[in-house]
Image (tube, rainbow, N blue to C red):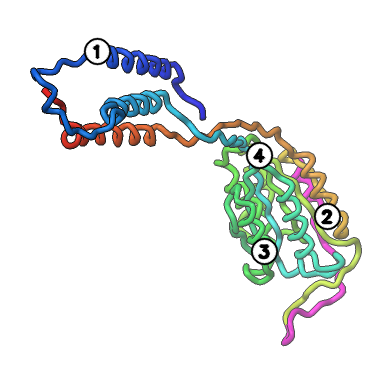
């Protein structure tokens, strides 16, 4: 137990002195004969019970006033790091099966989750885009919610197409008012901008205006890959088609905002890219430590009150004072 105001405990030293002075005081008896007290069976210690209760009450209140605290658990509060928005392309071409052992989207989801698990005290948000863009999770510190949202990303939940400008603009909009020390957008796509009302270069200029650094990632193997071209009765139909990624545009977006462009030609390359970005965007985390106590003031106040009430009850019943 510790005390917020330990000097008040010095008042406890006055209690033994008060008890000694009380014992030294000789009470007067206004009777000429002690025969009126004959037959009394009350024990000697009983006489000292009411003043003893008063001492207990005073001692409890003094201890309570000193601010007793029990426990002392240490709590660490971490200051916020950086703000990150991850924009993932969920157009049908992300089902291309050139990223063993799965398709592009599944590998991207796995690497995004691994990236999040390596962060600490960073606010991270999620944007999905295809022919349109939609915020899945605003920037948050709730990583489990973010991971579930990434796992739930599905092809076909948005209008098909590749609206790179809309995806980037939505990510920037989520970051512009974020309190993070720095702001980073990660945009992952496997195609060329062919939908949306926002030009990607305009979105990049907006990112620069709001001090958002953009890392662009082009995903897809060199040459050709099995890419969905439509739906049949049993699902998507695949054809071997050339992989078209607008690397010039993605590189320009990154350079405009002070970021970097990466090309992931397979799942291992994508994993390395996420690790690289993780290393590039690390902010020192400030940790403030607090000590949490359970205050015991009210407990001692209650003890003192109970002792005082008992003294008053005894004084009014069993221990009526002789005049």
Q: Is residue 73 visible?
A: yes
Query: Residue 50 placed where, x, y %?
Result: 26, 29
Q: State yes or no: discs 3 and 4 in contact (Cβ < 8 Å).
A: no
- Quarter of the image for the C terminus: give it: top left
Badge 4 element:
loop
Q: Which residue is mark 4?
A: 82
- The span shown in magenta is 232-255
Question: Is residue 318 left or right of 206 when viewed as pictured?
Answer: left
Q: Gap between marks 1 and 4, in whole Å?
A: 74 Å
In percent of width and height, residue 23 lies at 29, 16
Q: Residues within 10 Å of mark 3 (few under 14, many from 20)?
A: many
- What residue is disc 2 on? 270
Separation of disc 2 and disc 4 at Cα?
22 Å
Residue at 65% in and 31% down: 286
- Going from N to C along the chain, the mark reached first, 1 or 4, is 1
Per the model, the C-alpha gap separating discs 1 and 2 is 91 Å
Q: Which residue is mark 3?
A: 130
Q: Is residue 96 left or right of residue 120?
A: right
Q: Earlier in the sequence, mark 1 or mark 2?
A: 1
The crowd level at tag 1 (other Cα within 10 Å; few <14, some 14-19, many 20+) is few
Q: Is residue 255 above or below residue 219?
A: above
Q: Which residue is more in the foreground, 146 or 198?
A: 146
Q: CA distance from mark 3 to mark 4?
A: 26 Å
Secondary structure of residue under mark 1: loop
Would residue 253 be seen by someone viewing this image from the given angle? no
Q: Which residue is mark 1?
A: 25
Residue at x 24%, y 33% (from the top left corner) = 42
């Amino acid at each position: 137990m510790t005390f917020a105001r330990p000097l008040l405990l010095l008042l406890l030293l006055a209690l033994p002195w008060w008890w000694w002075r009380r014992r030294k005081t000789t009470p007067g008896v206004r009777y000429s004969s002690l025969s009126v007290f004959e037959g009394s069976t009350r024990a000697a210690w009983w006489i000292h019970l009411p003043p003893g209760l008063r001492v207990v009450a005073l001692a409890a209140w003094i201890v309570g006033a000193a601010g007793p605290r029990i426990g002392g658990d240490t709590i660490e509060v971490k200051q916020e790091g950086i703000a990150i928005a991850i924009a993932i392309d969920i157009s049908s071409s992300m089902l291309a099966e050139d990223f063993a052992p799965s398709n592009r989207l599944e590998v991207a989801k796995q690497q995004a989750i691994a990236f999040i698990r390596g962060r600490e005290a960073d606010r991270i948000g999620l944007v999905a885009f295809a022919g349109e863009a939609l915020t899945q999770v605003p920037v948050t510190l709730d990583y489990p919610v973010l991971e579930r949202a990434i796992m739930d990303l599905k092809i076909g939940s948005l209008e098909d197409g590749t609206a790179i400008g809309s995806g980037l603009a939505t990510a920037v909009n989520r970051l512009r008012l974020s309190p993070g020390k720095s702001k980073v957008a990660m945009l992952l796509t496997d195609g060329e901008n062919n939908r949306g009302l926002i030009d990607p270069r305009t979105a990049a200029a907006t990112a620069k205006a709001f001090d958002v650094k953009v890392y662009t990632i082009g995903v897809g193997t060199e040459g050709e890959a099995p890419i969905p071209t439509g739906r049949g009765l049993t699902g998507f139909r695949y054809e071997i088609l050339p992989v078209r990624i607008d690397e010039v545009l993605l590189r320009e977006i990154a350079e405009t905002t002070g970021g970097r462009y990466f090309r992931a030609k397979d799942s291992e390359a994508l994993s390395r890219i996420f690790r690289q970005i993780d290393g590039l965007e690390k902010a020192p985390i400030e940790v403030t430590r607090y000590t949490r106590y359970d205050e015991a003031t009210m407990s001692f106040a209650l003890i003192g009150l109970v002792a005082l009430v008992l003294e008053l009850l005894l004084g009014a019943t069993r221990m009526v004072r002789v005049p």
